[in-house]
Image (spheres, rainbow, N blue to C red):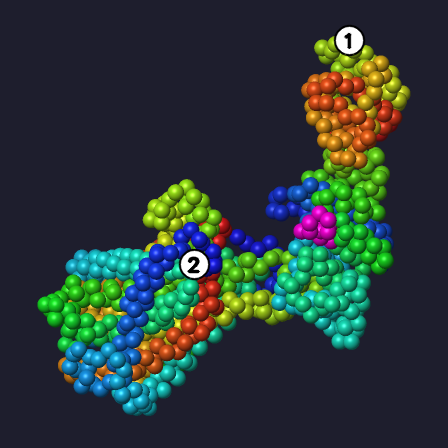
Amino acid sequence: MATISLQNVTKAFGKNNVIHGINADVKDGEFIVIVGPSGCGKSTLLRMVAGLEIITDGEICINNKRVNELEPMERDIAMVFQNYALYPHMSVFDNMAYGLKIAKIPKNEILQRVNTAAEILQLQDYLKRKPRELSGGQRQRVAMGRAIVRKPAVFLFDEPLSNLDAKLRVQMRLEIKALQKELGVTSLYVTHDQVEAMTLADRMIVMNAGNADQIGAPLEVYNDPQSTFVAGFIGSPPMNFLNNLFAQNQQLDSSAQQAIDRLLTDLPTEVSATLQQQDNDNLTIGIRPEHLSLCEPPTAHLIGKVKYTEPLGAETLLYIEVQNQQTITLRQAGDIEIPAAGDSCFIRVNTALICLFDSKGKRIQI
Amino acid sequence: MAASGMVIKRGKSSWLSHIGMIIGVIIVCFPIYLAFITSTITPEQVAHPPMPLLPGDQLLHNYQQAFFSGINAPVWKMLVNSLVMAMGIAVGKIMISLLSAFAIVYFRFPLRKTFFWLIFLTLMLPVEVRIVPTYEVIANFGMLNSYSGLILPLVASATATFLFRQFFMTIPNELAEAARVDGASPMRFFWDILLPMSRTNIAALFVILFIYGWNQYLWPLLITTKPEMNTIVMGIKQMFPVGGEVPDWPLIMATSILAMLPPILVVVCMQKLFIKGLVDSEK
Amino acid sequence: MDKQVTFNNRYLPYFLLIPQVLITAIFFFWPAGQAVYQSAYIPDPFGLKSQYVGLENFRFLLNDPYYLASFKTTALFSCLVTAVSVGAALWLAVMADRIIKGATAYRTLLIWPYAVAPAIAGVLWLFMFNPRIGLVSWYLGLLGYDWNHVLNDNEAMGLVVVASAWNRISYNFLFFLAGLQAIPRSVIEAAAIDGAHFWKRFWTIVIPLLSPTTFFLLVVNIVYAFFETFGVIHTITAGGPQQTTTILVYKVYADGFVGQDLGSSAAQSVILLLLVGILTIVQFRFIEKRVHY
C-alpha cells in the first residue's frame, strides 16, 4: 500500500521542456487517471514514475521515499503497457512468473501466486499457451496478471485498453475497476479517452501541453472546469463557448436584441456583476449542451438556426448557429420533437450553470 | 499466394511456364549434373569426347580414392578443415555481432556513434581487397597454416552486426521496458528475451555465414601452404597439375561433388529458413 | 532510427563491443592503414629497406596501360555479369510466379548454384568448355566452331561472365520471386479488369513495382562481380589471355603475391578501398531508406 507524491516534476528532452512542473498527491489505494490529448506529456509523466524516464527536475516520492534515482524494480511498481509487451516466446505462466524468478522468489510461492492471479483473471486454462495463441482481451489479462503477481505498491497503466475493440474495452474497463477496488492498490492510469477517465477515476489529472490543468474527482472536474481546455476536453459533446455575446455594437434585429437583454437580466447577480467589472469583450461564456433547451419565443435567451441534427436515440444533438456565426450544441431528450435543419429556433439557457473564462482561458471563480 | 490468381495463372500460359521453367532448371543444373557423371567414369572416358551423359560404374572407386588419398591431401582432411573454418566464421561472427548490436541498440554511451561508424565502415569490404597487408598481419602473428588465421580476418566484417541491429530495432520498446520493470538486468534481458526472440534470425544467418565460410577461396589459398591445412574449395585447384599434364577429371569432379554437398544440403534442407534470412534481412 | 529505451550501465556496452572492435581493428583497420602506408613506399630490390616516394605509386598506376585496361575489364565484366544474371533470374522468377503446382520443387532445384563456391563454379564451367575434352566445346566443334578460350580473349571473357552469372542466379532469383509475390494480387487483377494483357501488365505494372528490388540487385551484383569472382577467374583463365580477364581484385593478388610488387599492390588496395567505401555508403543509405518504409 502506498502514497505517491509528485513535487514540481519537470521533464525536458534537450532544451525542449515537455512537462512544466507537476504537483500532485495520491492517497493510499486511490485510482488516479491521467487524461489528456496525445502529446500532452501524460505517458512521459507515468514513465517517470515508473523509472523508465529520467526526471529532469522535481521529486517523486513513493511512500514518502524519494525514488528519482531508483531503478524501476526498486520502486515497487508494476506496469501494464499499451501493447501489453508480453514476451512472445514465453508461455502465459512464464510471462507472469518472470519478474518473480528474477526476484529469486521460491518456486512453490511463484506457482501459488501465479495460480491465484490466473484464477482472478480467469486465465487458468491458458497458462501453457503462448501470447500469440490468445485473443486481445486475454493478452490484456495476462499483462494485468503480470502486474498482480508482483504484489506491488503501485500499479501503472499506460493506455492499456487502446488496442481493444469498443465492446471489449467497456468490459475490461469494468474489470480493471473492480480488480483495483478488490486489491486496493494505488494506481496511476493514463488514457486519452475521457469516458474511460470519468468512469475509472477516483480523481483525475487533466493534462494539457505539459501542465496539469486540473486535478479532481470526475464530476467535480465536469461540473466545475478550471479552464476552457478542461471544459472542452471532458464531456462529449464538449462545452459550448460563446464570445462577444453582449458586445454593444452588434447589428441584431429586435427580437434577437430582446433575447440578449432577457439573458442579461436572468443571469445570476454575481455573473452580471463580473461581466460589468471586466472588459467583457474578452470573456468567454461556457455552457454545457444539456443546460440549453428549446423554448417558446417569448422566453428565449438566444435565437438561432438549426444547421443539422444527430438523433442518437436516447438523446438528440442539435447544432445551432447563433449570432456572430457561432455554432453551439444543444442536447435534448430523445423523445422530444426534433426540428428540421434550417428551422429557426429559440433557446433557453440554464443561467445558474454558466461558467465564465478570462481571455487566457482560465476560469473566473464567482 | 500460390493458390490464388485466376487472372494470370491459367490455361495455356501455365504450360508454357512449366516448359520454360524446365528448360531453365536444366540449364542451371546441368554443370552440376555433368560433374556428377564425370565422377562416376574413368579418366579415359573423359579424355575421348564426347563423354557419356549417363552415370558409369566407377562411382565407388573414384569417391573412395578421393576421400581417403586424394592428390595432395585426402578429401576427408580438407572437409574437416572446411568444416572448422565455416563453423568458426559462422559462430564467431554471430557471437560478436549479437553482443555489439546489443550494445549499439540498447545503450547510450560516449563514443557510441564513433564505434558505430568504425564497425559499419567494414560493412561490405571483402578480404580480397586488403589481402596483402592482412596477410602480413597474420604472418606477424605467426598464424599462417592455422585455424585462427583462416577464421579471424573473415570474422572482421559488419554484415551480421548490421542485420542484428536491424532486427533489434524492430523489437517493440515496451519489451525492454517490461523487462526493466520486471527487474531484469541488461544481460538477463539479453539472455532471456533478446536471444530467444532472435532464434530464427540466428539460424538463418548461420546458414548464410556457413556457406560464406565454406566457399572461401582466396584467403585459404594464401595462408595455408601445408596440404594438411588446405580447405576443400581451394584444394580442388591444387589438384590440377602444374605442367601440361592431363588433370585427373573424375577425381577432381568427385572432390568437387564432395565439396558442394555440405552447403547444398544445408541450403536445401533449411530452404525456408535460408530464404527468409536472405530476403528478409538483406532488404 | 535510434531506440528510445535504453539500459543504464556505464561500462557494460564497452565490454560488449570489445570483441568486434578488437577484431575489426586488428584485421581491418591495421591492414588498411598498412596499405595506405605501403602505398607511399617502394621497397629496394633486396627487400632490405623501403624508399619513401609519396604519391609516385599512384601516379605510376594511373599511367600504367595494364592498370587502366584492368579498370575497363572490370567495368565490362561487372556489367555483363550483372546483366546476364539479373536478366536470367528475372525471366525465371516471372515464370515461377505464374506456376501454381510444383513451384517449390522448381525453387529447390534453382537454389543449388548459391551453395556452389565461385572457385568450384569456375571448375565446372572450365570442364564443360575445355578446348580438348569439354563436352560443349566438342559439340561446338561439330558445328564448325573452334572454341578455345585459352587463346581467344572474347571467349575467355564470355566464359568467366557466364560462370560468374550462373553462380549468382539463385540469389537474384530468390529476391525477384519474393518481390513478385509481394505485389498485391489486387493491383494485377485491377489491371486485368482494365483490359491489360500479360505483357502489358508486365511492363506497366510488374516492372515498376519491382524496381526497388531490381535496383538493390544491380548494386549487390556489381559489388559481387567486383570482389567475389576471384575464384572464378583464378580457376578458369588466371587473368589471361594477355591479362584480358584481369579484374582489379585479381590484379591486386597478381601484383602483390605473384609479382611481389608490394608498393603497387598496396596502392591498388587503397584505390579499391576508396571504391568500396563509396559503394558502401550508397548501399548503406539505400538499405537504411528501405528499412524506413
Q: Which residue is rendered at x = 75% and y = 62% of the image?
A: A145
- Quarter assignment of residue A79: bottom right
Residue range in magenta is A157-169
Q: Which label belongs to residue A254?
A: 1
Q: Position of residue A288 (x, y in %)?
A: 80, 30
- Do the residues indicated by labels 1 and 2 lie within the same chain of the protein? no
Residue A343, above or below B268 = above
Identify the residue under disc 2.
Answer: C178
Q: Nearer the viewer, residue B108 or C191?
A: C191
Q: Which residue is rendered at x = 26% and y = 76% of the image?
A: B34
Which chain is mark 2 on?
A: C
Residue A16, above or below A310 = below
Classify 10 Å Cα crowding around label 1: few (below 14), some (14-19), many (20 and above). few
Q: Which residue is rendered at x = 38% and y = 67% of the image?
A: C106
Instruction: Select label 1 or label 2 by which is in front.
Output: 2
Left or right relative to C291: residue A181: right
Q: Nearer the viewer, residue B76 or C37?
A: B76
